Amino acid sequence: MDRSFFRCPDARGLAAALLGLAVLAWPAAAVERAPARAAGAAAATLATGTERVVVRWRAGVGPARERIAQAAGGEAAAPLRMARTLTLRHGIALADGASVDARTQVVRVAAGNVAALLARLAIDPEVEWAEVDQRQRIARVVPNDPFYGAGQTPPMPALGQWFLRAPTVDAPAAIDAVAAWARTRGDAGIVVAVLDTGVRFDHPDLADKLLLGYDFVSDPATANDDGGRDDDASDPGDWIMQAEHEAVNGPFAGCGLTGRDLGSSWHGTQVAGLIAAATDNAIGVAGAGWHLRVLPVRVLGKCGGWSADIAAGIRWAAGLDVPDVPRNPHPARVINLSLGSQATCSRTYADAIAAVRAAGVVVVAAAGNQGVAVNQPANCPGVIAVAGVRHVGTKVGYSSLGPQVALAAPAGNCVDLAGPLCRYPLVTTSNTGTTVPAGPTYTAGDFLHGGTPTLGTSFASPLVAAAAGLMLSVQPGLTPDELAHRLRSSARPFPTTADPGVPACRVPAGFGDVEQLECRCTTDTCGAGLLDVGAAVARAAEPLPVGGGGGGSLTFGWALGLALASLLLRLLDRRDLAGRGSVGRRRRRAGR
């Protein structure tokens, strides 16, 4: 081994520098703190029912000056303990509270003496100001949108936006968006792309929340408009005629069921409203993402759409290039895919999803509505797949399930089927038109007034997409993997008090398996748990891992540097102690 390095006069400095850099990477919490000072005795022992008063001493006053000098000298300033002095000076019993800074502290006083104390402190020449300490509470935001509004009486909110509220005994699956709104109402710069049937730009709850978007439906037969790709992402309707539905060998066979199911779904408009309907505007519904904005990307027409068009839409939504299409000026951070088919993940989907994830875009998709294995693209690598649950937290009968599911969210269900009400659907924005667009409206569970309930994992997925948008609003640097991890780790456990007559869900054998109806969710069938938007946003706000790593507080590179630097210093010290090496001898002779 070449020992010349150890004889270099700068070797110790280099090692010390490496050690210093490594120590800088150590979490702040690991820094040794100054010894705690013993708390001083209270000036008085007060009964319960005291109030807190904040007292600010004037600059230069003895106790404040002493504590500022301590802090300037590198010594932690002792807490202010002036209650005894003030008690003797003003004749009102006080007890010391916590310090705010070197000149400001809290004192406690009996509730009946607050006014007298404030009056005397106001003329005390050594007191700059004094005021009652005020309790601050979480800013719980309650939108005034009618379907969400507070103070609703039965059957509301069971017919309204029950799913955005805090969980209750009757609806433990509610996502608690209100807790998230206390931290953030969403950043309007965070864009959520909705790849769907397009949207109705004329809806009053969406008009100011939509970006222009693009139409990727390339097949004229399915377009229901002039056909071809263009910059009009509005939804012309996805209706089919009865004859098309009944034509056994036709391209649209079985696309409708009966009656109004042949009419337009306005599916994209419903999805967009769940994510970002204008909130607190005294109109209709609230959006889970409040201030988030929606980028509509039309990829579905009559009887659905083609995976190639959807893949092109995925790339474009993320700001990637698509031939013959202008680049998207408003790249999305989140893409919602409330669509799919019973197949394993195709290369068409997999490549597009991998490309946008590499660009930092989160992809969320509905698990499917067949009650069997998870559809594509929800089963593609890196996708946050969402299963659907009933209001009580059990898997809703139609929801697909399996180990690919990340977590579950309300998908809408009906209670009181025998009556005119469908309790616990998901209310959102829609349109009254059967074929061509007509007046804007809202879905609901009140059949007496023409409401059509919103049901399906298509509507569980956008609730998770909105949660992802809110998470990025508080921590824009989250990678898709880190966001998915925090989303799953913040999920609320599935209820354990479900009806014992409801069987546990099981992992499906495949797409041809027997459909599973309502069942009790497990972590290998419905994901990590129930969506909790408040907890997800709180988790997102936590600091990012050092160096963007996988959650450790010290990266491997810095840990290795620390170890090497420490080893180097030990080797140098051994040479000094043994008296070998000219550097060590010179330093000892110089008394260094």
Image (cartoon, grey):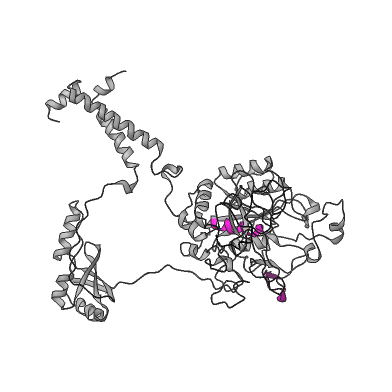
- Magenta segment range? 439-467
**Going by the picture, which residue comes out furthest to the front?**
500
Residue at figure coordinates x 25%, y 65% from the top left? 98
State the image coordinates of residue 590 (x, y, percent, origin top left).
12, 28
State the image coordinates of residue 46 (x, y, percent, origin top left).
22, 74
Could you say which quadrant of the image residue 352 lies in? Answer: top right
Could you say which quadrant of the image residue 39 lies in? Answer: bottom left
Is residue 225 a member of the stretch shown in magenta? no
Check the image and report above or below for 181 versus 591.
below
Residue at figure coordinates x 68%, y 73% from the top left? 421
Judge from the rendering whether residue 115 lies leftward or rightward of residue 375; answer left or right: left
Q: Quadrant of the N terminus?
A: top left
State the image coordinates of residue 65 (x, y, percent, origin top left).
16, 61
Asked whether residue 286 appears in the rendered view, the answer is no
Please name whichever residue, 318 or 20, is drawn nearer the observer in this view of the structure: 20
Residue at figure coordinates x 43%, y 48% from the top left? 544
Judge from the rendering whether residue 178 lies leftward or rightward of residue 20; answer left or right: right
Is residue 459 a member of the stretch shown in magenta? yes
Please name whichever residue, 439 or 588, is drawn nearer the observer in this view of the structure: 588
Residue at figure coordinates x 35%, y 71% from the top left? 135
Q: Quadrant of the C terminus?
A: top left
Please name whichever residue, 108 or 9, is drawn nearer the observer in this view of the structure: 108
**Going by the picture, which residue comes out furthest to the top?**
1
Asked whether residue 314 appears in the rendered view, the answer is yes
State the image coordinates of residue 308 (x, y, percent, origin top left).
71, 45
